[in-house]
Amino acid sequence: MNLNLENKFFIVGGATAGFGGATAHALLAEGAHVLAIARNADKLVAFAKEFPGKVETISGDITQSTTIDKIAEKVASRHIDGLMLNAGGPPPTAATDTTMQQWDDAWLSVARWKIELVSRLLPQMRQNGYGRIVFIESVSVKQPIQNLVLSNALRLAVVGYAKTLAQEVAADGITVNIMAPGYHATEAVKRVVKKRSETSGVSEQQAQQQIVQHIPVGRMGDPKEFASLAAWLLSPQSGYITGQTLSVDGGVMQGIFG
């Protein structure tokens, strides 16, 4: 399928690893241009060299207002075809062990920056009468995950915001969707496995096996599989899909609406 992404312009957070890296590569493979945001400047330089003339970069923490200022300045007056809101998640912790400082930090790292960045870029999309916005969250918005209370709680706030926004901007040609990944071979999942190992008193290999045995397809996901759906949601082909939370989890969610 031709996603019609040739020469379209996308902004991708966390673009050098995990879901962000896989999605940026998928978009570039379709002929798109990407503004890649990540904290590791060396990785960004290497990434840009892979795709000469196709990649622009901003080195910084996308969850910080200073980086958001740089993004808004760099793309001012440009036609933004799509925005992928993606960054690392909060640390694993149980509800009874979480401090108020951790709650405050998680609000900033999970929710606030996404609202700020969208608010800064949305007027340009509305003016152009087109846009694709994709939030990368977690299956924790559909079913709580053990020892991930910060993700369980605050990602739901993002979904509430995104669903409301989707209804407000649909008539402007802008779609807003949420992707809810399950267990994939990423650094974030490695942290979850490590936490489970520590709390359960088993090895990390055993902890991972405990997780995999509950995944119907019998394995961790590949970020490239995730990226194929992300690229489609960011494409013109997805124009009749908005306000949805789509699980990408190998069948982990047992509910009728997945």
Image (cartoon, rainbow, N blue to C red):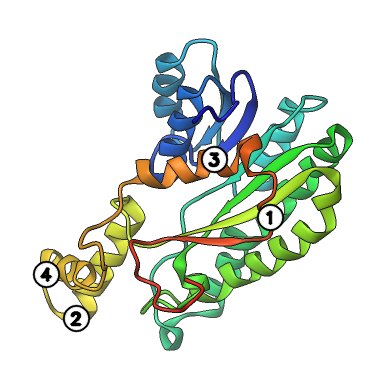
Disc 4: which residue: 206
Judging from the image, what secondary structure is the residue with disc 3 in? helix
Label 1, label 3: how many angstroms apart (C-alpha)?
13 Å
Judging from the image, what secondary structure is the residue with disc 4 in? helix
Image point 44% across, 40% down: which residue? 228
The relative height of residue 244 versus residue 5 in the rendered view (above or below) is below
Q: Could you tell whether 21 is left or right of 215 in the image? A: right
Q: Marks 1 and 2: which is nearer the front? A: 1
Q: Marks 2 and 3: which is nearer the front? A: 3
Mark earlier in primary sequence (3, 4) = 4
Mark 3: amino acid: Trp
Mark earlier in primary sequence (1, 4) = 4
Q: Could you tell whether 209 is left or right of 24 in the image? A: left
Label 3, label 4: how many angstroms apart (C-alpha)?
35 Å
Q: Marks 3 and 4: which is nearer the front? A: 3
Mark 2: amino acid: Ser
Question: Farthest top residue?
Answer: 52
Label 2, label 4: how many angstroms apart (C-alpha)?
10 Å
Disc ID at residue 242: 1
Image point 30% across, 53% down: which residue? 221
Mark earlier in primary sequence (1, 3) = 3
Image point 50% across, 80% down: which residue? 99
Q: Could you tell whether 68 is left or right of 145 in the image? A: right
Mark 1: amino acid: Thr
Judging from the image, what secondary structure is the residue with disc 1 in? loop
In which quadrant of the rendered view does residue 81 lie? top right
Query: Residue 66, how many percent across, how many down?
Result: 68, 41
Disc 3: which residue: 232
Mark earlier in primary sequence (1, 2) = 2
Disc 2: which residue: 200
Q: Is residue 18 visible?
A: yes
